[in-house]
Image: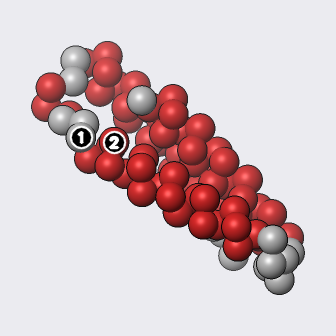
Amino acid sequence: MMDSYEAFFDEYIAFMEKYKENPTDMSLLGELSDMITKESEMLKEMEGLDQSEMSGAELAYYLEVTGRIYEKLAKVTQF
């Protein structure tokens, strides 16, 4: 699950980088629609996670992955 979550954000970040390079590219609208759908699916899956039921190793991996995602997002959203 966490690997899929990180893969989604890698894809999202790649999209954002393309958008930053050419914000007037109308072909990106179709990709944006796909990204919104994927984001919705990922959020539903993540909402189903109960951190209180995770083992110590699972929680550590969860925190590791989310930390990497936040670092990546910070780089792409810098102005």
Q: Position of residue 8 (x, y in %)?
A: 57, 44
Disc 1 secondary structure class:
loop
Q: Quadrant of residue 34?
A: bottom right
Judge the density around disc 2: few (<14), some (14-19), many (≥20) Cα neighbours within 10 Å: few
Q: Nearer the viewer, residue 7 or 62?
A: 7
Q: Nearer the viewer, residue 51 or 1?
A: 1
Q: Position of residue 72 (x, y in %)?
A: 62, 50
Judge the density around disc 1: few (<14), some (14-19), many (≥20) Cα neighbours within 10 Å: few
**Marks 1 & 2, CB-CB < 8 Å contact:** yes
Q: Position of residue 28 (x, y in %)?
A: 76, 69
Residue placed under numbered mark 2 in the picture: 45
Disc 2 secondary structure class:
helix
Number of numbered discs visible in the structure rendering: 2
Q: Nearer the viewer, residue 78 or 31?
A: 31
Residue placed under numbered mark 1 in the picture: 48
Q: Residue at x 54, y 38 (%)?
A: 6
Q: Is residue 18 visible?
A: yes
In the image, farthest residue toward the left:
52
At label 2, the amino acid type is: Glu
Q: Is residue 15 left or right of residue 1?
A: right
Name the disc covering residue 8, or none: none
Position of 17 relative to 3 (above/below): below
At label 1, the amino acid type is: Gly
Screen quadrant of the N terminus: top left
Q: Is residue 74 visible?
A: no
Screen quadrant of the C terminus: bottom right
Q: Residue at x 50, y 58 (%)?
A: 37
Q: Position of residue 57 (x, y in %)?
A: 31, 16
